[in-house]
């Protein structure tokens, strides 16, 4: 058994080297396809992160009139917290608002004089409501129209990120569609190139195959090196793709981190932590594809 | 050992390879199948090692009915039948030793066994001192001896030689015929397909003559009479 595996491996490597340029072209096509698919995955991840970063900033500030009773504010908090669209509600008391104002304008004499002239605390309590997604804005704003506390609300302030998110989604959707089409084209080319590589391999080795058949080599022994060669090429393609992808991610990481507003965008970490799943499934898919193509070529050109 | 019962091979659309062939070859026999070009000699040989399937009739080798042999069983048959051709069919990039060993390698034989068997068969064909040479460094006769050595590594019960002397001069052809006779003496059944009159007459063994795909004569100690 081990001897057969060893000899099959040897014949597969011979196929690779004797057919070097054809193997190289096949490898290049496999790598191109994998890189395209991975660029798609990177894009997907970046789009998700960008949208998440925007959505993290989605909040509605609700300012109550001064002297609004605490029970009214508590009512508003309770009714907002039960909404599934609300991620968090932070309460800022009137006293906290005053202290915050004083801290912020401590160096501004004019402001501090104005505050003194007003006398007392002109601020009312306020709420900072964080939504789950941008599309949850509408529901939150509607909830604030509750008659129990509507009249006590002085002002509602929110930034409309919906437009930004929509634009990110539109651009990424377009790029994603383009990427999928491009991957599809590359996959088709891979099938054709693998088919042709095997066909050429069979042609180059026709004399050897003829003799193998003559001296009693089993059909599997004749076929196996071609299948194994494609597995080796797929494995090599994954290796080359990793060698291209990770430096690329490392370069992208800091730039993207600035964009999403953090120390790290988690790009490299995402591909490292999920590497086995991501590249393992790509390897299996590639093997499946090359096996189908190889089998088709052998069925057509190898009469054993 | 080998039995043909009313065997015909018709190639599409209606070309007769062999027709209604009945013959029986005993174990250890040396049989020459002769005839002019296109009379079906090679077709008969191809039917024996399952390169072709008969259109009609039944073929048995050692009690094994190979008439409708399955593709996956063909390798097993070929390990029991050695085949030698006019054009030697050697791998030019392999040495004599490697060419012979190749037949064992593809049959998953262990390296230790290969190291034992290959020198033995190279001794039989008297090429032990040229084991590391490449085919293009050998004469035609020597190349044919390599092919014979390769066909012997599985210790076949039957050796089919299809025009083995076709590319050789008289001296080399005689050497090959002597070698085939020697192999036959060891107990291997030899089926020689040839149109070499001198070689057949020298052998003084059984001769089956084909004409237009049919057996026209089958003589125990025969001569080439065409």
Image (cartoon, grey):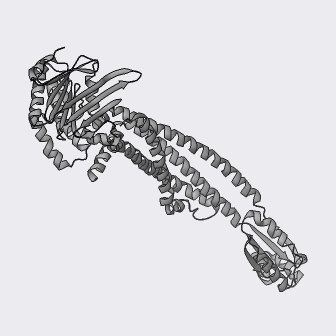
Which residue is nearer to you in this view: B212 or A90?
B212
Instruction: State which quadrant residue B179 falls in.
Output: top left
Q: Residue at x 47, y 52 (%)?
A: A283
- Image quadrant where one finds the N terminus of chain B: top left
Q: Taking B217 as reference, is A100 left or right?
A: right
The reply to whether residue B66 is visible in this rendering is yes
Q: Residue at x 60, y 60 (%)?
A: A257
Whole-percent x, y for residue B133 in the image: 16, 33
Q: Is residue A233 above or below residue B26?
A: below
Farthest residue to the top: give it: B226
The reply to whether residue A110 is visible in this rendering is no
Q: Taking A41 as reference, is B90 left or right?
A: left
Q: Residue at x 66, y 63 (%)?
A: A52
Q: Taking B157 as reference, is A95 left or right?
A: right
Figure disc tally: 0
Instruction: State which quadrant residue B203 falls in.
Output: top left
Whole-percent x, y for residue A126 in the image: 80, 77
- Image quadrant where one finds the C terminus of chain B: top left
Whole-percent x, y for residue B75 in the image: 29, 41
Which residue is nearer to you in this view: B135 or A127?
B135
Q: Is residue A48 above or below residue A110?
A: above
Instruction: State which quadrant residue B142 falls in.
Output: top left
């Amino acid at each position: 058994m081990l001897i057969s595996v060893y000899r099959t491996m040897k014949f597969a490597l011979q196929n690779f080297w004797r057919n070097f340029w054809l193997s190289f072209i096949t490898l290049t096509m496999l790598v191109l396809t994998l890189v395209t698919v991975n660029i798609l995955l990177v894009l997907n991840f970046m789009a998700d992160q960008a949208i998440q970063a925007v959505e993290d900033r989605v909040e509605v500030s609700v300012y109550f009139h001064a002297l609004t009773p605490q029970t009214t504010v508590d009512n508003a908090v309770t009714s907002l917290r039960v909404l599934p669209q609300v991620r968090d509600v932070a309460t800022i008391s009137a006293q906290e608002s005053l202290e915050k104002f004083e801290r912020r304008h401590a160096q501004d004499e004019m402001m501090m004089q104005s505050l003194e002239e007003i006398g007392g605390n002109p601020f009312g309590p306020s709420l900072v409501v964080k939504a789950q997604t941008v599309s949850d804005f509408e529901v939150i704003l509607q909830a604030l129209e509750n008659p129990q506390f509507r009249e006590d609300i002085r002002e509602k302030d929110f930034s409309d990120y919906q437009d930004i998110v929509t634009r990110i989604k539109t651009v990424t959707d377009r790029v994603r569609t383009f990427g999928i089409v491009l991957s599809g084209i590359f996959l088709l080319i891979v099938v054709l190139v693998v088919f042709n590589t095997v066909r050429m391999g069979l042609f180059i080795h026709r004399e050897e195959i003829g003799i193998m058949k003559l001296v009693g080599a089993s059909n599997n022994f004749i076929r196996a090196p071609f299948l194994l060669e494609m597995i080796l090429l797929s494995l090599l393609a994954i290796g080359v793709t990793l060698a291209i992808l990770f430096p690329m991610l490392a370069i992208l990481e800091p730039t993207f981190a600035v964009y999403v507003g953090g120390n790290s965008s988690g790009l490299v970490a995402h591909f490292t932590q999920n590497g086995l799943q991501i590249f393992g499934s790509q390897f299996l898919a590639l093997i499946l594809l090359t096996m189908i193509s190889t089998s088709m070529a052998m069925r057509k050109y190898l009469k054993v | 050992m080998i039995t043909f019962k009313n065997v015909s091979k018709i190639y599409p659309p209606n070309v007769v390879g062999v027709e209604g062939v009945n013959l029986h070859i005993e174990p250890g026999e040396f049989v020459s199948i002769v005839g002019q070009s296109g009379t079906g000699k090679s077709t008969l040989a191809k039917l024996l090692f399952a390169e072709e399937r008969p259109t009609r009739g039944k073929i048995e080798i050692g009690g094994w009915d190979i008439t409708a042999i399955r593709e996956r069983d063909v390798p097993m048959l070929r390990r029991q039948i050695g085949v030698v051709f006019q054009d030697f069919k050697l791998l030019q990039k392999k040495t004599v030793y490697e060419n012979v060993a190749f037949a064992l390698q593809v049959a998953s034989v262990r390296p230790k066994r290969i190291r034992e068997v290959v020198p033995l068969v190279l001794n039989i064909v008297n090429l032990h001192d040229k084991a590391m040479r490449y085919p293009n460094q050998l004469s035609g006769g020597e190349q044919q001896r390599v092919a014979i050595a390769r066909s012997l590594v599985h210790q076949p019960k039957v050796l089919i030689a299809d025009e083995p002397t076709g590319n050789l001069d008289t001296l080399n052809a005689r050497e090959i015929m002597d070698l085939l006779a020697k192999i036959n003496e060891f107990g291997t059944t030899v089926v020689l397909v040839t149109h070499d009159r001198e070689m057949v007459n020298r052998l003084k063994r059984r001769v089956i003559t084909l004409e237009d795909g049919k057996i026209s004569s089958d003589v125990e100690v025969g001569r080439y009479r065409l």
